Amino acid sequence: MAFLRSTIHYISTLRSHFVEQCSQDFSEDEDEKVFARKYCSLLICICSNYEIFIIEKSEQSQQLFTLLKDCASARNLRITVQSLDFWYQFHETITTRLIDAVKERGGDMAAFLR
């Protein structure tokens, strides 16, 4: 986990370069803005495989949310779609786990939330 925390910190330090590339107009050229696409791919990979970093209350979760927000607001549609795909999958994961947890406790959502 220390390696992942270091990686999150490192990619956070590159945020300004990423945001700069994301603020430029969309291009059909696959060779343009390679850094931004790779950066977003790495971020999505970390968030998809280590969801604990998103749901825990920590500095890393705040950094990840900020970076994911940057991805979602990019002008490059490829980057934006990557981000939206992640959020859709994350929503499905959370919903499924919540439903399973409620079922394990008798199926009463109100009782589960108390």
Image (spheres, helix red, strand yellow):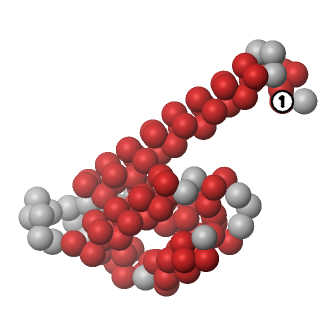
Say above or below: 90 vs 111: below
> Is 72 left, or right, of 54 in this rendering?
left
Q: Secondary structure at mark 1?
A: helix
Residue 81: x and y in percent read 32, 49
Which residue is denoted by mark 1 in the rendering?
113
Q: Classify the position of the N terminus by image quarter.
A: bottom right
Determine if residue 49 is in view.
yes
Look at 68% across and 72% down and name the residue there: 59
The number of numbered badges drawn on the structure is 1
Name the one closer to the observer, 92 or 72.
92
The amino acid type, in three-letter code, at marker 1 is Leu
Look at 29% across and 69% down and name the residue there: 38
Look at 47% across and 45% down and name the residue there: 87
Determine if residue 23 is in view.
no
Look at 54% across and 37% down and name the residue there: 93
> Is 40 left, or right, of 11 in this rendering?
left
Residue 18: x and y in percent read 36, 75
Tell me which corner region of the image, top left, top right, bottom left or bottom right, holds residue 44. bottom left
Residue 23: x and y in percent read 32, 70
